[in-house]
Image (spheres, grey):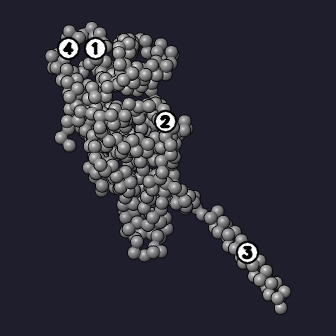
Amino acid sequence: MLERYFADSIIFVLSYVLLTHSLCFVAINKAATMSPSSSLTAASSSSSLWILKPSPAFKSSRFQSIPPSLPPSSPPCFRLLRRAASLPHASATDFDFALHDALESSGINTSHAREARKGFISQINELSNVERETSISINRRVDLGRAALYIAAEDDSLISHSSVPLPVDAFLERLDDLSLGYCSHYNSLSRSSRENFLESIEKYLYVKKGFRRSSAKNLAEPRALYLHSVLTHRSGSALMLSLIHSEILKMFRLWGLLDFDVEIFFPHDHYGLPRAYDKQKSKESDQPHIMTVQMLLEKVLRNLKAAFWPFQHDHVDSLFLRAAHAANCVDDPNGSQESAYQLASAKAAQHRLERGVWTSVRFGDMRRALSACERLILLKTDPKEIRDYSILLYHCGLYQQSLKYLRLYQDAKSPSSSQSRSTNSVSILEEEAVQKLFVRLNLIAMEEDWCQPIYGRNFLGNNSEPW
């Protein structure tokens, strides 16, 4: 009897194992036959960065996955929530930037700004050489919305000194809600042709939701330059509108609503709106209007850099020459013809910065200009960004750091690029100013107490803003 009992037990165990393997085999075959959109959705749900969660609009039924407003053949719509994943170690911090340390030495807490910077670095670390040249409409590797919000979060922390950081995840959810809201307008007429589908998205974004482009006169206003402000006020630059448009298309591709290649036409005028078009019908003239990931991030940061550059009123277009002129590093042959208003504006700007007054963006903001320069350096774009960062540090009284980055600039620029710019009058003036600044910083290095940076003398910690 005992032997029979053991035999029955062994047969039961073997039957259970065979049944388990059979169920796993069926599940694998079912996953292999899933549609591409379903496979992508399943892959996204298993990632550490994405969670597919049913929208509150149809939470009443636990098993209902298709909103009533969609036809039965339409794929299910879900709210795509980006979970705040743990940030990897930022390997790009070897530059040893000065902004956060200078503010900390002045008694300003920069913990939120540092976390936002780490978040930005975690995004750009995903940029390969191929991904940098990828169109924003087909980018899958970098979360541009999150990267733009990290930029806004850092700058918000620098100017507000709030004990609460900018809610990045809340604004990402608001960005996802834009895509989810389109589902209620989804109908068979929108899918009658590709052109009708893309046109319905534009009407939803620019008519139904009321997003509009800021006028050329208001490009220096922060509302047009930061993604969270654009999502709140629904008015922004062409860059921000292009980013929002691309994020909506990305969500539709994940949901299976978009099954063809789309490009975004970026307008270079002051009034046009970014629009999506079928890539198969693109023309040669559309190539200059394609926005890549690298181009978008560069333009966003350079717009911020130009908007908050401390020396706004000058007759030259080069931001570096404006700062060099304020530092008396430029011999301008037309200086005698300069108006009294320009001279007074330059002196007033320098005086405001020394007192720590930054109440108007038209007179610049050294902190946000420095942060934009540091992020541009992290993007590894143009060596000129290192040069511009150096002269801002000079105006801050951080001479040791200024000399360090000026040397990095001279090492980074290629001889061929210097020869190609030798015939450009602006480039000649810039290089002459660089040499004068380099000589001056070396003379300062010979002074006593050189290795003891006195952060108290710079204006970064002397905050006199009303908030």
Foreground: disc 3 or disc 4: 3
Quarter of the picture holding the C terminus: top left
Which one is earlier in the sequence, the residue at label 4 or at label 2? 2
Which one is earlier in the sequence, the residue at label 1 or at label 4? 1
User: Helix or strand or loop: what does disc 3 sit on?
Assistant: helix
User: Helix or strand or loop: what does disc 4 sit on?
Assistant: loop
Labelled pair 1, 2 in contact (Cβ < 8 Å):
no
Q: Quadrant of residue 111?
A: top left
What residue appears at the point 49 percent right and 40 percent down from the top-left corner?
90
Residue position marked by numbered label 3 in the rendering: 17
Tell me the amino acid under the disc marked 2.
Answer: Ala
Tell me the amino acid under the disc marked 4.
Answer: Glu
Residue 7, percent across and down?
82, 84
Alpha carbon of mark 1 to alpha carbon of mark 4: how far?
14 Å
What residue appears at the point 42 percent right and 23 percent down from the top-left corner?
405
Residue position marked by numbered label 4 in the rendering: 338
Tell me the amino acid under the disc marked 3.
Answer: Val
Q: Dot 1, how many residues are within 10 Å of its Cα: few (below 14), some (14-19), or many (20+)? A: some
Alpha carbon of mark 4 to alpha carbon of mark 2: how far?
42 Å
Residue 260, percent across and down?
51, 52
User: Helix or strand or loop: what does disc 1 sit on?
Assistant: loop
Residue position marked by numbered label 1 in the rendering: 328
Quarter of the picture holding the N terminus: bottom right
Alpha carbon of mark 1 to alpha carbon of mark 2: how far?
33 Å
Foreground: disc 1 or disc 4: 1
Residue 97, percent across and down?
41, 31
